[in-house]
Amino acid sequence: MSDGTEGETWDPVSFWARVHPERLALRMGEERWTYGRLEEAVTEAAVSLYDQGLVSGEHVSLEFGAEQGLHFAATFHALHRAELLPVPISQRLTEAERVALRNRAHVDVALTATPEPAAPSGTKGRKEKPPLFTRRLDAPAAILFTSGTEAAPRAVVLTHGNFFWSALASARNLGVRANDLWLLTLPLHHVGGLSILTRSAYYGTAALIQERFDPEAVNEAIDREGVTLVSVVPPMLERMLDVRGARRYPDTLRAALLGGGFSPPELLQRAAELGIRSRPSLPGSGPTGCERREGPFPSWSSRCTGPKGPCSLRTRRERSTFAGPSSPPRTSTTTRGTRRRSGNPGSAPETSEPGTGRDGFACWTGGWIGSWSEERTSHRRRWKRR
């Protein structure tokens, strides 16, 4: 990271592709992508996005199917390389629901597949833009949506700093090992799933992507695939234990990260009896930043709270540090949108209180997209282009 108020970090995929190109980055089904292979896919997609005439700062929605996890990851990193802002949206939503979210996040282009390189032509095409291998921590990294359980989903701007410090806090909580394999069963359009992708890239470790959560498939992956870490919410853990029976989990599973709600002590006891070391999310272990232990705060604690009170983090000996910050892609399907650029404050899609999350909890995010005052702030801080 550079000195000064505006810190920078390296593009993690590019970094690990240069340092350890043979190291495993992603797995899904029978496909295995090393960091070298992932870098190739990211570079191709980034050049293709630029050749299609997208302008730096445009908002691009990622509306991929669950079976396209590898290509989602490559395209997500490619958008950063091309200085575009990803907006993950679930493809399981109806078209009307997706359109509403696009409008709320001011999406310019919708992608439903990884963009392919443009076909060679006799005419002189757009000159390739040099790839961007650094990340400004205060620059936007994604627009995600709140759950919308109690109100309409809000578009939340998360910065590269949110994801970076989230990864660092998680490393302090769980440690990092070079052979770590994080099982990813959470939706990639959700902050929980997306954080596993970004966290693994920063560490230079691997993620095993499953299309959806299936308790038997999760248990099998833990038993046979060498999974060392898994992120679940309490109902998911309960279903895993229900189908597990009395079989203990292997020692290769270092920990299960629990979040998203209250964990009953009885559930934690059942997990412990089968060999699962459950770790609660620390403040700072997830990038959305709500007080419900889901995000980075200005300063994060070195202690966590378990069902029986405070618990110390792993010892220094158990912790380790990290040194650095398939089949061909499907044809890209894009949809051009329009972003409101009028200066009319009354045209804002919704009004929200700055720095307030769902249920009134304080949040430490890049900002909301909603009210006119918030939009002016986001333009001033280069969260959105004019």
Image (cartoon, rainbow, N blue to C red):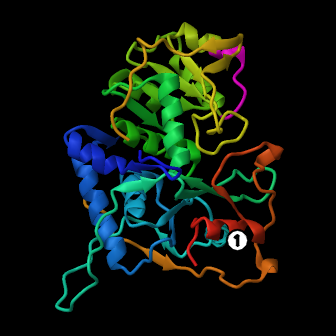
In front of the other: 384 or 231: 384
Give percent across and percent down for residue 222. 41, 24
In front of the other: 265 or 144: 144
Give percent across and percent down for residue 237. 59, 25
Residue drawn at 66 percent across, 35 percent down: 260
Quadrant (top left, top right, bottom left, bottom right) of the N terminus = top left
Number of on-image labels: 1
Residue drawn at 34 percent across, 38 percent down: 324
Q: Is residue 218 left or right of residue 358?
A: left
Give percent across and percent down for residue 177. 35, 24
Vertical placement of residue 84 versus 3, above or below: below
Q: Is residue 32 something one can see in this rendering?
A: no
Residue drawn at 83 percent across, 45 percent down: 360
Residue tagged 1: 376
Question: Given the current orientation, which residue lies at the most extreme left position?
Answer: 122
Q: Is residue 36 left or right of residue 63?
A: left
Queried whether the magenta region covers residue 335, the answer comes back as no
Quadrant (top left, top right, bottom left, bottom right) of the C terminus = bottom right
Question: Given the current orientation, which residue lies at the most extreme top position?
Answer: 273
In front of the other: 245 or 252: 252
Q: Give the magenta part as a residue range.
A: 260-268
Q: How dense is the environment of label 1, judged by Cα within 10 Å: few (below 14), some, or many (20 and up)? A: some
Residue type for callout 1: Arg
Residue drawn at 28 percent across, 61 percent down: 43
Instruction: State which quadrant residue 306 falls in.
Output: top right
Q: Is residue 271 left or right of residue 78?
A: right
Instruction: State which quadrant residue 265 falls in.
Output: top right
Question: Given the current orientation, which residue lies at the most extreme bottom position?
Answer: 123
Vertical placement of residue 374 versus 151, above or below: below
